[in-house]
Image (spheres, coloured by chain):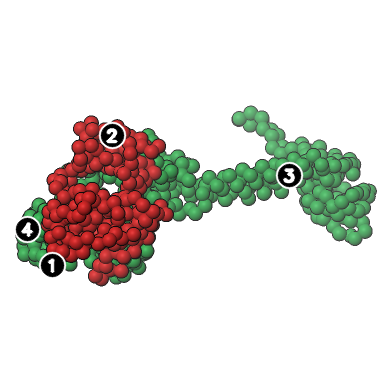
Amino acid sequence: MSAGTPPQVQSLTCPNCGAPLTVRSMGRAVAIVCGHCHSILDAKDPQLKILQRFEDAIDEVPLIPLGSRGKWRGSDYEAIGFQVRSMESDGLTYSWREYLLFSPYKGFRYLTEYDGHWNDCSVATALPEAEGASARYLGKKYRHFQTCLAKTTFVLGEFPWQVAVNDDAIAVTDYIAPPYVLSSETAGNETTWTLGEYVNGADIWKAFGLPGLAPTPIGVYENQPSAVKTSAGRIWFAFAGLATALVVIFTLNQLFSQQEQVFREAYSFSPSSTEASFVTPEFELKARTSSVEVQTDADVSNQWIYLDYALIDEDTGQAYDFGREVSYYSGVDSDGTWTEGGHQDQVVLPSIPPGRYYLRIEPESDARLGSIGYTVTVTRDVPVLGVYLLAFAALLLPALLISWRTYSFEQMRWAQSDHPVVTLGGGE
Amino acid sequence: MSQPAALCPSCGAPIVFQWSSSVQTTCPHCKSILVRTDVNLEKVGVVSDLPPDSSPIQVGTSGVYENRAFTVAGRIIYDYDEGSWNEWHITLNQGGSAWLSDAQAQYAVTLAFPAAPLPALATVHLGDRFTWNKTAFEATVITEARYRGVEGELPFQYWDKQGATFIDLRSTGGDFATLDYSDTEPVLYLGKFVDFDALRLKNLRAFEGWS
């Protein structure tokens, strides 16, 4: 190289078509592409030797025009190069675009765009280690996403490396740890690693003052951060903790509940009886406010009995009304014998203050059938399972929901990869 | 710390050595390459015009590397197939010197590291692993470089060299090493890739239109 290297900040002309060229990277360029005829020129040659010429180049328009400047990641950068690269998969061609950014102080980085998804990429200085189907970079694990053969199909602007259109395909391998992607490109025996971070198109539009709006991203991109903000792993961890606490509380409650039987009496109900309701003798609910279980055992067979109960506080007159039904049916049909219902019913009233109480009972049944014998048992301070089941469900539901949403999102992400089967919990 | 001025044997301009151990310098006035002998300065050549510069660093730029302040005293410019790069000779204010390389604005600082035996050039291949200073390195790039020019003070005579081969090595933790085969005996330099901002550089070149 002689002293005649293209000087910075000077307009040159394309040796192929004579159009003016602008050099933006201050002597760091290795290749310059004519914006008019798209010839690729050797930036190190004072004569700008033509490296590649095109008869009828398809014109791709960069979304970030070359020469655009913006404050990006805390420094001023200028868009100086643009290339379109593509890969083939299952007979389809997928193209993505790369925008080379330059700062005379910070050097080069580039933005990539595919279907409206953007990544901010820079060269990885430390050496990543491949570990089977994953890679480790600076202590972080990245999962293999896909390996493809990429070709450059269009270039514009200038580059600090040799560029060529429709060159030999380069093996590109992506490993992901959203929002990061670690990519290796192997050409010959040299491998270059770059680290990309998923960024919002809107941020780029704002930084570079681009007109209009950034294109809306389509689908889920390989290293796009999950739309589910809560990690499924973490919520299951929380679920496990709370569920364990629940079991412990339930067990203690079970152990310490007195389960004291305070009343038991057998009755017989005749549907023909004119007496609609009756009251039981008084019984005492001692100690503290606690749960009360009312159990009904009825001698029903192919019939039903409905009992309209009221637990009444003798002193205050406060009544707790509830209706219970006991029914039992059995028979024989083409599938054999069948039964439905049972002979017993339990109901728990969650918190009844201590005091003297009695029950008012109003039984009802099918008048055509005979009398029914039944026993009423009242037990105080029984463990209340229902509340715990409800609490358990309340804990389980969000965990299931988040897992499902995470699964769906990851399914969409990995569907584009070399490993379209999702295993949960690999992230984080 | 500046040394008493000597005069350029070629043009008579005063020559000030920033660093006492510098062996070579260039006359800022007439571009003569001067080598320090026991008694005086000897002109050994003339610097050809330097290529248009792209590095934001210049002789006189100061900064900090691993809590050690440094000043840029000189540089060697190399050409290779993909362009050129600068090896800035930095003098550490606590004594000693090191190199700050600017290759496509990717910066690394290295210091000569005494290690023996070093592998012969012909025996090293990309991917080969070595351990120096308890750090595992892998050879990642072999560069055939051509000596392009010099500026300012250097710790050795470097005016009559033609080409040199360098092997760059990296670690998984951001360490950087270079095996320099420009002399008969290879020299090892160990250091780290450094972030531009972390160097806290002052007295940088100004680029018109850039801040």
B18 vs A381: above or below:
below
- Callout 4 environment at 10 Å: few (<14), some (14 to 19), or many (20+)? some
The residue lying furthest to the top in this view is A336
Q: Quadrant of the N terminus of chain B?
A: bottom left
Residue A418 shows up from this direction: no
Measured from the top left, where is residue B98 in percent x and y?
Answer: 31, 50
Measured from the top left, where is residue A26 in percent x and y?
Answer: 20, 62
Question: Quick one: which chain is green?
Answer: A
Residue A55 shows up from this direction: yes
The numbered dot on residue A47 is 4
Residue receiving disc 1: A11
Mark 2 and mark 1 residues within 8 Å of each other at the beta carbon = no
Tell which of A367 and A354 is nearer to you: A354
Q: Separation of disc 2 and disc 1 at Cα?
A: 48 Å
Please state which amino acid type lies under the numbered disc 4. Answer: Gln
Please state which amino acid type lies under the numbered disc 3. Answer: Ile
The numbered dot on residue A249 is 3
| Dot 3 and dot 1 within a common chain | yes
Secondary structure of residue under mark 4: loop
Secondary structure of residue under mark 3: helix
Mark 4 against mark 2, which lies toward the viewer? 2
- Callout 3 environment at 10 Å: few (<14), some (14 to 19), or many (20+)? few
Measured from the top left, where is residue B127 in percent x and y?
Answer: 28, 35
| Dot 4 and dot 1 within a common chain | yes
Residue receiving disc 2: B118
Letter of the chain that mark 1 sits on in the rendering = A
